Amino acid sequence: MNPSDTLLPHDAPWVVVKFGGTSVSTRPRWDNIAGIAATHLAAGKRVLIVVSALSGITDQLKAIGEAPADAARCADLRDTIVARHHALFGEMGLSRRNGVDAWMAKLDQLLADPRRNTGELAWQAEVLALGELTSSTLGAAYLNSLGLTTHWLDSRECLRAEALPNQADWGKWLSASVRVRHDPQTAAALAARGNVFIAQGFIARSGESATAVLGRGGSDTSAAYFGALLKAEAVEIWTDVPGMFSANPRQVPDARLLSRLDYAEAQEIATTGAKVLHPRCIHPVRDERVPIRIKDTNRPDLPGTEIVWNTQSSAPSVKAISSRKGITLVSMESISMWQQVGFLSDVFEVFKRHGLSVDLIGSAETNVTVSLDPSDNLLDSDVLARLCTDLEAFCRVKVIAPCAAITLVGRGMRAMLHRLSAVLAEFGALDVHLISQSSNNLNLTFVIDEAVVDSLIPRLHALLIRAEVMRIGDPEIFGPSWRELAEDAAAVHRTSWWRRERGKLLALAAESTPRYVYCLDQVREQARGLGALGTVDRWHYALKANPHPDILRSLHAEGFAFECVSWNEIAALRRVLPELPAERILFTPNFAPREEYRAALAAGVRVTLDALHPIAEWGEDFSGRDIFLRVDLGAGRGHHDKVKTGGAQSKFGVSLSEIATFRNLAREHGARIVGLHAHLGSGILDAQHWRSVYVQLASLAEQFNRIEVLDLGGGLGVPSRPEDVPLDLAALGAALEEVKQAYPQFQLWMEPGRYLVAEAGVLLAKVTQTKRKGEVHYVGIDAGMNSLIRPALYESWHEIVNLDRLDAPPEELVQIVGPICETGDVLGNNRRLPACQEGDVILVAEAGAYGAVMGSRYNMREPAAEVCL
Ligand code: PLP
């Protein structure tokens, strides 16, 4: 009998483990979940696994709920959602798809439901709930297939939504709350059924049989509800970061891991900005005194952050500095308010009537200023305008936005004021709109203009440490810095797939070299990382990077559309994916002949023009057509001058000064410009780059009449040299989201190539000869620049190892060269390798992008062949 089938003793403790979207999106991640659950089970604990939807799915379901009338878009989203779940099902190697298909059928049913026409909130909640219902169904099937008997539990059986007083209607359905206490009967009933359960985060029962969802961070909240309901020994939130930090590490790399916090401090930090834990999930466990542990899925050995009843640390100190952007201040001025009975009651009644929850309050004899936080309120200009009109019956109203709230969090704030002088001095030069000190003595908040906050926070963090109010020397409270942890993680990151697959790679090399080998799992993992950034409405794969048919098929299954730069690329793509609708292909040629544009237009492919010539000389071809315009924003970026595609020295795009001429020509010929495009270079690791492109394109688009889409191009880099810091996807997501909020009217598209495939490919070669010339030692291999031209063309750096002697210590400094008659035929300069011998297998890493596809038959040598693992 399976050990997970024998019921544990009735008093065995419960552990609730929660996994978010990225953690449930691939088979290796599910193996990880199985490992964590099995470890708890082996320690005699019952396990309840709470899961989110696969990454990106909730955003796609949300997009359906928000644009129910756009049939084409809904159909597109529906297909992407089904394909994602089927792809994971296939990857899991499961045999019966009924469970998943039943939920997908439910999605079709909801799309055909008449409630869709009105976008009814209850209908939206049902649509949203499908993400978790499907992921948990897939998870249960997979865990059982591994031999871990796991019972699927419908969270709606246990969690019942309760309307809060004055809660707006959307909140009841889409941001619902549940009141739970320890329920020994439910716990005992579950314990009698089994040891391991899987349930959905984010969803609850509303009324008798309807479904409500818990809003953002809902899965954490569900885990906390279950933790309280079962009075668990602990709730473990497994995530992609090591815990909570003394500041947002993306703003402050020296922020410290917070090892231990009490509930009140954690609540304050979560409420005032930290995104790791949703503020709503602390209250339920605090009542039952169930500890929360935040753990890093990638590094389970790290201690993480523990949130407990009492940290034993009562000395006043600042634990964290946090910030929230998008704050709106409403300033209410009236001389008649002084000593006027009921003034506050009157104005707050207006906020209540508009369903707005007030956060901070500052008051004077003639003025009351309050802040509205976008995470608690559905703030749009209409709501604000209506609020102001109603408030004007009592006072003069001024709205100040966008603001940011900076908060210092820690016990005994009032007892530390005298030590905060240097911190307060920083605010001296700024326009501080409001200061608030919380009555629980846990926070001190300053509201300032949003624009200065990113540069201010690192300075303030350093000053708090210098003033010793943030006592980072206390190991009970503070752990290592984000920077230290990131360096360790970079080492882990470099433990690439090809190290794990060394045996297979050696066997492939024994058959023949030179050879490119691709790992499709790695392609999928990269795709899912991007897919999880819900802000991007459509991802395209720039297939110039690597058009291998299996890669095209994999990315199609991951919901990617495609970007092509030649008619032959379009034709090759359609051969591999004959069912692909033409509108999922973007054609972005440069100096291509007229026939290619005509063929693409005839095929129904979306065409981007990047010069005046086509529209000026062949204008009739574009008459009545929707076209995109590629703009040169004036400066390129990238890992090498030859990959920068902006600025006068680059041949791409229409310069800003020529846009008016382009528009006139388009108008003359009856072509509609519906999209703006900019791709300024490749191999960019700075997330803020796309923010700046996005802002520039969006403000340009506002000068046009019918722009629907902004396409920010590709260029997303992957680290190659050991010192490179990987592109911070979360920062990219946050930056894009910020701009999207300001320009929600435009769809956002992107088209990366390299990011998806670079790390998925390696080039295998064999040592042909070795040679010494004076001090210089050459190792010759059978792959040259005709197989991989990037080092010669772009001075690109690829990790190179001797796969036969992977663990041997490096002994020699060598030049790794190919067999081509060119001095530039060098794949790696000055590399430290163990002594290499003829026949040794050499691996050139990160060769999946712009590798094989740039191969040539120079010297009449065949370039490396390609194979997928
Ligand atoms: N889009 C366009 C228009 C491009 O020219 C390129 C690369 O040349 C890409 C996307 C993809 O760039 P990357 O592979 O750096 O993401």
Image (tube, rainbow, N blue to C red):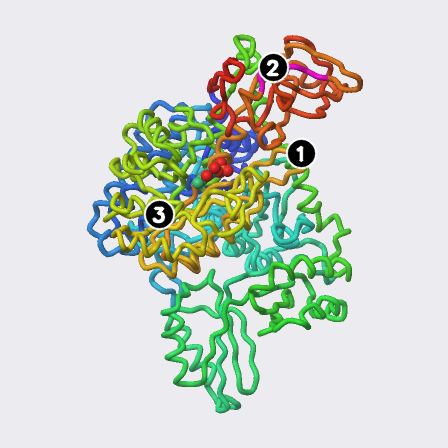
Q: Nearer the viewer, mark 2 or mark 3?
A: 2
State the SS at label 2.
loop
Q: Nearer the viewer, residue 726 or 203?
A: 726
Left or right side of 570 for 603: left
Q: Which residue is mark 3?
A: 628
Q: Nearer the viewer, mark 2 or mark 1?
A: 2
First in sequence, mark 2 or 3: give its number. Answer: 3
Q: Which residue is mark 1?
A: 722
First in sequence, mark 2 or 1: give its number. Answer: 1
The answer to whether residue 265 is visible is yes
All told, the count of numbered labels is 3
Q: x and y percent of residue 620 in the render? A: 25, 46
- Disc 1, disc 3: CB below 8 Å? no
Q: Amino acid at mark 1?
A: Pro
- Magenta residue span: 778-784
Q: Is residue 780 magenta?
A: yes
Q: CA distance from mark 2 to mark 1?
A: 27 Å
State the SS at label 3.
strand
Q: In the image, is the residue at mark 1 within 8 Å of ligand 1 by its beta carbon?
A: no
Q: x and y percent of residue 615 in the render? A: 32, 47
Q: x and y percent of residue 775 in the render? A: 80, 19
Q: Amino acid at mark 2?
A: Pro
Left or right side of 682 for 76: left
The answer to whether residue 24 is visible is no
Q: x and y percent of residue 58 in the render? A: 39, 46
Q: Residue at x 67, y 37 (%)?
A: 723
Q: Residue at x 53, y 83 (%)?
A: 367
Left or right side of 861 for 308: right
Q: In the image, is the residue at mark 2 within 8 Å of ligand 1 by its beta carbon?
A: no
First in sequence, mark 1 or 3: give its number. Answer: 3
Q: Which residue is mark 2?
A: 819
